[in-house]
Image (cartoon, rainbow, N blue to C red):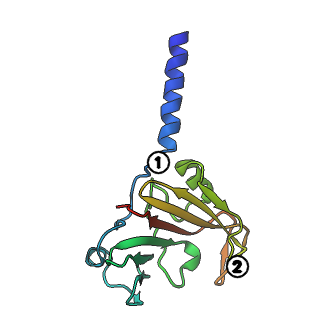
């Protein structure tokens, strides 16, 4: 009986650790730290470019920010509410999570957030969950309540955007 108890507990511990991994699997076609030329080879030319550090790839559903060396420092994936301006990227982003998933799924897969902002300072209709990992930070903004945004109905707990930011020294 003791051996069975130990085996079941070990299996449960392994399952919990796998679900709350500090290393979410990467599913995006582009990676933090990649050069602009690599981004262009994958996403094509940007739809808008401020010529300094940010480019909009509206047909792909991404906004990309670059560090002073021209390498990807931030990837923003826009949720479906922004479909008048951006294609909604419906493929997995991290750990098979999609921008079309509800915030609860992110919390289950990524574990306890490092920080929670409800509501966020500049928009009382949005909340934000933040997970800090060794080489990057994930910020997921979600709608706090049902309402209309850009003439599009959005529901509470739908994702507004997923932002992945390279940590200082992160690759």
Residue 161 rendering spot, x and y as whole percentages: 55, 70
Residue 7 rendering spot, x and y as whole percentages: 49, 20
- Placement of 155 over or under 3, stated as above or below: below
- The residue positioned 30% from the left and 81% from the top of the image is 44
Front residue of 131 and 8: 131
Q: Is residue 82 left or right of residue 95?
A: right
Residue that numbered label 1 is attached to: 22
Q: Quadrant of residue 27?
A: bottom left
- The residue positioned 66% from the left and 84% from the top of the image is 151
Residue 99 rendering spot, x and y as whole percentages: 52, 65
Front residue of 29 and 83: 29
Q: Secondary structure at mark 2?
A: strand
Residue 122 rendering spot, x and y as whole percentages: 67, 78
Q: Quadrant of residue 93?
A: bottom left
**Label 2 neighbourhood size at 10 Å, few (<14), some (14-19), many (20+)?**
few
- The residue positioned 54% from the left and 71% from the top of the image is 79
Q: Quadrant of residue 49?
A: bottom left
**Label 1 neighbourhood size at 10 Å, few (<14), some (14-19), many (20+)?**
some
Residue sticking out furthest to the front: 169
Q: Of the residues under marks 1 and 2, which one precedes in the sequence?
A: 1
- The quadrant in which the C terminus is found is bottom left
Q: Secondary structure at mark 1?
A: loop
Residue that numbered label 2 is attached to: 148
């Amino acid at each position: 009986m003791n051996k069975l108890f130990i085996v079941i507990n070990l299996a449960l511990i392994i399952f919990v650790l796998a679900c709350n991994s500090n290393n979410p699997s990467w599913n995006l076609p582009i990676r933090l730290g990649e050069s602009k030329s690599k981004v262009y080879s994958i996403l094509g030319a940007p739809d808008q470019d401020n010529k300094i550090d940010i480019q909009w790839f509206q047909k792909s559903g991404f906004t990309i920010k670059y560090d002073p060396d021209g390498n990807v420092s931030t990837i923003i994936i826009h949720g479906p509410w922004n479909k008048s301006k951006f294609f909604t990227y419906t493929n997995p982003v991290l750990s098979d999570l999609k921008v079309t998933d509800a915030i609860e799924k992110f919390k289950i897969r990524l574990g306890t957030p490092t920080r929670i902002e409800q509501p966020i300072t500049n928009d009382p209709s949005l909340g934000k969950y933040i997970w800090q990992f060794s080489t990057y930070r994930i910020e997921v903004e979600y709608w706090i309540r049902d309402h209309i945004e850009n003439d599009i109905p959005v529901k509470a707990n739908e994702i507004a955007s997923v932002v992945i930011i390279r940590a200082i020294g992160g690759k």
